[in-house]
Amino acid sequence: MQNTERRAGALCFVDSSIGHAKMEAVSYQPRCIVDAHHHVWDTRLGVYPWLCEDPPIPFRYGDYAPIRRPYLPDDYRRDASPFEISASVYIEAEWSHHDPVGEMDYIARLRAEEGLPSVAVAQAWMDRADCAAVLESHAARGFVRSIRHKPRSNPKPGGAPGAMTDARWRAGFARLAPHGLRFDLQTPWWHLYEARALADAFPSTLMILNHAGLPSDRSAHGIVGWRAAMSEIARAENVAVKISGIGQPGMPWTAASNRDVVLTVIELFGVERCMFASNFPVDSLCGSFSDIFGGFGNIVADFSTAEQDALFACNARRLYAIGEANG
């Protein structure tokens, strides 16, 4: 397990002409990457309400107009081209909630035509009457590894419990393990105490926490609350975490601004339960692929080669069973 005293790698500076961080030097470049969290979408299909309909929704990165366009495998490959992407994990992209199976039909076509992604995280609503049928359909596809349903949450700490405490929601969650499905959890950090109770109640289901528990409030108070919640959920051995989606609105993605968050997550979960991921194209609002993965490389430059390989590739391959069956 690492500790947050690690400080190595290059410094970053901002080039205002391009609006992203540039690396003065990079101490470590990953040899290959398994991108544990990315999207592709075709807005011409009209099946993504948040991307296709007006007005835009409130969004944690602010204005997201630049990504309200088709983003296809060739676009992803172009963005990722400075690196060797050996495999990738597609994450459901808020396709119309009326047709979660249709999204996986689309991804199956992309896999056949484009060879990307390797595996997928599909959408299913844990508390809906169609949950059992949707999960059965997803599980029948050899490339679906996990399910994501963002549970009901509060906009700030305090208030009523979120959906993870609802009996009906939990009944849907209970259907995952018999199908061998994981669960990708995206929820604000103040709901991670409920997530810990959920993980303990279903120890045979691997829960994969998205976006480092969303440490969006970088104030001293916010970071204290986030770290305490992350420490709690990290004690559940059936929980892993993706270090991704940690950009800040109106600020470039830099190693300097994200170093403490990254190292804290690794300290709490241990290298073996952490994965680096791009969250592209969403995080293109904060930085380029090189900014983000170069930044990760900067932050873990003094880790061992085995630890670096685990964070950039091996853990994602193991935790999402990439290379097994149709993955």
Image: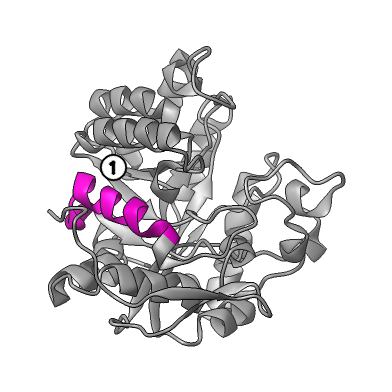
Residue at the spot x=75%, y=42% of the render? 57
Residue at the spot x=81%, y=56% of the render? 46
Query: Which x, y percent locates residue 291?
Result: 49, 74
The answer to whether residue 143 shows anywhere in this view is no
The answer to whether residue 230 shows anywhere in this view is yes
- Element on which disc 1 rests: loop
Crowding near pointer 1: few (<14 within 10 Å), some, many (20+)? many
User: Which quadrant of the structure image shows residue 71?
Assistant: bottom right
Q: Is residue 126 above or below residue 93?
A: above
Q: According to the image, label 1 marks what residue? A: 206
Residue at the spot x=81%, y=54% of the render? 52
Q: Is residue 208 left or right of residue 44?
A: left
Q: Split into 4 quadrants, where in the image is the C terminus?
A: bottom left
What's the image's color scheme?
one colour
Q: Is residue 181 above or below residue 263?
A: above
The answer to whether residue 264 is magenta is yes
Q: Amino acid at mark 1?
A: Leu
Q: Nearer the viewer, residue 272 or 87?
A: 272
Q: Is residue 42 above or below residue 319?
A: below
Q: Is residue 55 left or right of residue 262?
A: right
Q: Nearer the viewer, residue 276 or 302?
A: 302
Q: Nearer the viewer, residue 24 or 234?
A: 24
The answer to whether residue 13 is magenta is no
Query: Which x, y percent locates residue 189?
Result: 43, 33
For the stretch drawn in magenta, what is the main secondary structure? Answer: helix
Q: Is residue 127 above or below residue 255?
A: above
Query: Which x, y percent locates residue 298?
Result: 32, 73
Which region shows up in magenta? 257-273
Query: Which x, y percent locates residue 159?
Result: 53, 13
